[in-house]
Amino acid sequence: MRENNEVRWRQRFDNFKSAFRQLEAACALDEYSELEFSGLIKSFEIAFEMAWKTLKDLLMYEGFDVNSPRTTIQQAFDSALIGDLSPWIEALESRNVLSHNYDKKIAAGAEFLIKGTFLPMLGRVMETLQMRAEKK
């Protein structure tokens, strides 16, 4: 079972890397059409989803019992996989709001958060996971 969990987290990590690259490309634009802006938000949602699920799979491989995004994020913080808990909780809440409700005012603030907070946060966990993948 442990071997299956290792394969699973590494496969999920590959998916996260692809989603992160897509988010980086979306963040590189200076201006957005309405459709491109929707793509930025969707790219964030997917990258965030892949990030927490990669963390979950790695933590399960390491013997932790985590299931929900919130418990996964907390354990990732406790295990020093992420350095700051607050942007992760903010990203989780933003992902929930953005994926279930479209409000132009909320969406407008999302660009600032995605580019200024969430992209760097996901980049840091990408580096941490890459180092972990290279160790094992």
Image (tube, grey):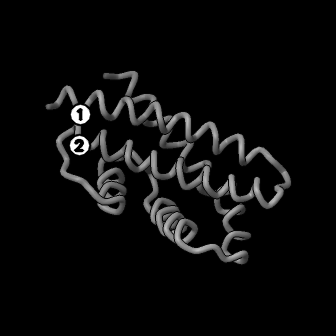
Q: Is residue 132 above or below residue 33?
A: above
> Could you tell whether 125 is left or right of 71 in the image?
right
Q: Residue at x 67, y 77 (%)?
A: 103
* Neighbour tally class for label 2: few under 14, some 14-19, many 20 plus, Cα within 10 Å: some
Q: How many discs appear? A: 2
- Give the camera-side residue of 74 and 84: 74
Going by the numbered disc 2, the residue's amino acid type is Met
Q: Image quadrant of residue 70?
A: bottom left
Residue 65 placed where, x, y %? 18, 51
> Could you tell whether 113 is left or right of 123 in the image?
right
Marks 2,1: beta carbons within 8 A: yes
The disc label shown at residue 5, or none: 1
The numbered mark, 2 or 1, whose residue comes first in the sequence reads 1
Residue 31 placed where, x, y %? 85, 54
Q: Residue furthest front?
A: 35
As helix, strand or loop, the secondary structure at mark 1 comes to helix
Identify the image quadrant of the N terminus: top left
Q: Which residue is mark 2?
A: 60
The disc label shown at residue 112, or none: none
> Could you tell whether 37 is left or right of 2 in the image?
right
Residue 100 placed where, x, y %? 52, 71
Q: Residue at x 67, y 65 (%)?
A: 110
> Could you tell whether 23 is left or right of 29 in the image?
left
* Neighbour tally class for label 1: few under 14, some 14-19, many 20 plus, Cα within 10 Å: some
Q: Residue furthest left?
A: 1
As helix, strand or loop, the secondary structure at mark 2 comes to helix
Residue 101 placed where, x, y %? 57, 74
Identify the image quadrant of the C terminus: top left
Q: Residue at x 36, y 53 (%)?
A: 77
Q: Residue at x 53, y 47 (%)?
A: 47
Going by the numbered disc 1, the residue's amino acid type is Asn
Q: CA distance from mark 2 to mark 1?
A: 7 Å
